Image: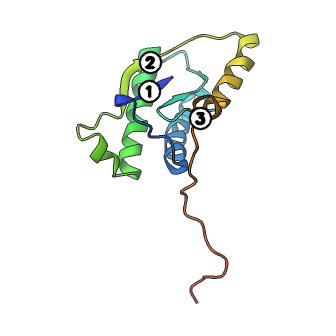
């Protein structure tokens, strides 16, 4: 689990969730295996298999660093909230799960919005079919 700095609710917009998810998915090419992501307003839960060549501390730093960089690139307004550039707090939680507990862990991740009473606003731009340039 990663928490945002100062526990700000930064994941109440779908575009923020999508940016963070895409940043994490970048590491698929390095052998990371992600399952479902669960955004709870101010934090994110996700089960991930980390390749053996990376320590947990290295993987943690890689994930936090790249996702923060992408959040600030795609959503420049975050610089107002985080003027020193730190998006994630120092808090982290790691837990190993076996195959039996994996399903419970995934269900827990999927229930984050309901569990924390978060309503996500879909702010992604959509095309209107009647208004096309000719």
Q: Nearer the viewer, mark 1 or mark 3?
A: 3
> Which residue of the protein is positioned furthest toward the bottom in this rendering?
134
- Quickly name the residue at label 3: 117
Query: How dense is the environment of label 3, judged by Cα within 10 Å: few (below 14), some, or many (20 and up)?
Result: few
**The C terminus: image quadrant:** bottom right
- Quickly name the residue at label 1: 3
Residue 28: x and y, percent? 58, 34
Instruction: Specify whether residue 35 is in view.
Output: no
Q: Nearer the viewer, mark 2 or mark 3?
A: 3
Q: Quadrant of residue 81?
A: top left
For image coordinates 38% across by 37% down, the residue present is 68
For image coordinates 60% across by 10% down, the residue present is 96
The reply to whether the C-beta atoms of the residues labelled 2 and 3 are less than 8 Å apart is no
Q: Regarding mark 1 in the picture, which secondary structure is present there?
A: strand
Up/down of 126 relative to 16, above or below: below
Query: How dense is the environment of label 1, judged by Cα within 10 Å: few (below 14), some, or many (20 and up)?
Result: many
Separation (CA) of disc 1 from disc 3: 17 Å
* Earlier sequence position, callout 1 versus callout 2: 1
Q: Which mark is residue 92?
A: 2
Instruction: Specify whether residue 60 is in view.
Output: yes
Residue toward you, 96 or 32: 96
Residue 102 placement, left or right of 92: right
* Earlier sequence position, callout 1 versus callout 3: 1
For image coordinates 51% across by 43% down, the residue present is 12
Separation (CA) of disc 2 from disc 3: 22 Å
* Earlier sequence position, callout 2 versus callout 3: 2
For image coordinates 57% across by 46% down, the residue present is 120
């Amino acid at each position: 689990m990663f928490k945002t700095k100062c526990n700000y609710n930064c994941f109440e917009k779908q575009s923020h969730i999508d940016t963070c998810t895409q940043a994490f998915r970048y590491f698929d090419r390095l052998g990371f295996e992600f399952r479902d992501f669960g955004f709870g307003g101010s934090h994110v839960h996700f089960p991930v298999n980390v390749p053996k060549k990376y320590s947990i501390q290295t993987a943690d730093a890689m994930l936090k660093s790249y996702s923060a960089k992408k959040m600030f690139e795609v959503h420049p307004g975050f610089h107002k909230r985080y003027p020193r550039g730190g998006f994630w707090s120092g808090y982290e939680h790691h837990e190993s799960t076996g195959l039996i507990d994996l399903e419970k862990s995934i269900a827990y991740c999927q229930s984050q919005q309901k569990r924390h009473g978060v309503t996500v606003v879909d702010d992604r731009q959509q095309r209107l079919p009647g208004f096309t340039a000719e």
